[in-house]
Amino acid sequence: MQILIHYPFTPEQIEAFRQAAAQHGHTVIHAADEAAALAAAPDAEVILGYFLPAVCAAAPRLRWIQSFSAGMDKFLFPEIIARGEVQISNVAGLYASQGGEHAWALLLALTRQIPLAIHNQDKHRWAGEPVIEVTGSTLGVIGMGGFGMEIAKRAQGYDMTVIAVDAVRAQAPSYVAELKPATRQNLHDLLRRADIVMTACPLTAETYHLISHEELALMKPSAYLINVTRGGIVDEAALIDALNAGQIAGAGLDVVEKEPLSPDNPLWDAPNLILTPHRAGASQHRPRKIFEFFMQNLERYLQGERPVNLIDKRRGF
């Protein structure tokens, strides 16, 4: 069997993959670019990292792909979905702790007026505006996968009541007061009740513009909206309208529908909005975590075991 690695691992990490594969009589090819990946594709049974359409089309023996991404919306092209013999694993949960931190960073920056403080510091001005205490409030979490679980865990430190909806998970962890199926009715009920809403669901056909004009109108005027998972879940035009009208108190976005955000996009100028450039999954530990996860899952595959984090390609997660 040949294992094709198309990801910027270090030489030491590539050697570790080679040694692991050699113990089972298999070989590893490391492709530095698409041309090298295409050349190696015909003999590849496994791809670790990037799996480009042309490379997959040139790989008739392909059976398993290990993606470096948690969200799969940008990677599941029709041809790979149609190939029933090819399984795909993602890294769901691997970036959850830093994602949870980032969601809370956005919320606290909004409620404690941190952007204004930085602006005033630049001007050497000692002044402030009213701030909001989140302790004891109600947090609504949309999606209870890795990001959602880490977001909800952190709410315990603020004595918050956590309510959530999820399309798959049915049993609430101890720190979630209420977990309901992700129906439209349950989502709308969550939006009416929550003081803070954090989206933590994947982007699929069902969740595209999940939060739009109707949903934002249901939220409290004092409520905040945070999205650190995928652009497209929040209808940006609807959010701009809601912020300009004072329909909600503020929003924090780490992701937008089309990245990078163009300089002329009106999101830049929306009031009470903090934008960060898709950094929620970033961490000094991320390269090591990816390597360790890939290695553990490859070992499972080489031993004839089922890899973890296999996705449903048609559902998109």
Image: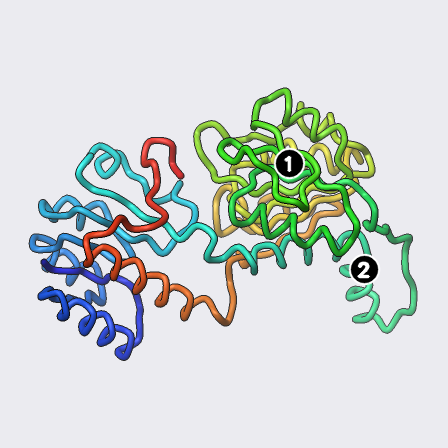
For the point 64% across and 53% down, the residue is 103
Distance from the alpha carbon under mark 1 to that under mark 2: 31 Å
Q: Secondary structure at mark 1?
A: strand
Tell which of 166 and 129 is nearer to you: 166
For the point 78% across and 39% down, the residue is 195
Amino acid type, label 2 = Leu
Q: On the rendered image, what quadrant is the N terminus found in?
A: bottom left
Amino acid type, label 1 = Ala
> Which dot marks residue 164?
1
Q: Residue 315 occupies which quadrant of the picture?
A: top left
Residue 62 placement, left or right of 104: left
Q: Secondary structure at mark 2?
A: helix
> Which dot marks residue 255?
none
For the point 78% across and 61% down, the residue is 114
Quickly name the residue at label 2: 116
Q: Earlier in the sequence, mark 1 or mark 2?
A: 2
Point out residue 206 in the picture as x, y percentages from the top left corner: 47, 27
- Rendered position, 100 above or below 240: below
Residue 266 placement, left or right of 300: right
Tell which of 125 and 6 is nearer to you: 6
Q: On the rendered image, what quadrant is the C terminus found in?
A: top left
Binning the other alpha carbons within 10 Å of mark 2 as few (below 14), some (14 to 19) or many (20 upward) gives some
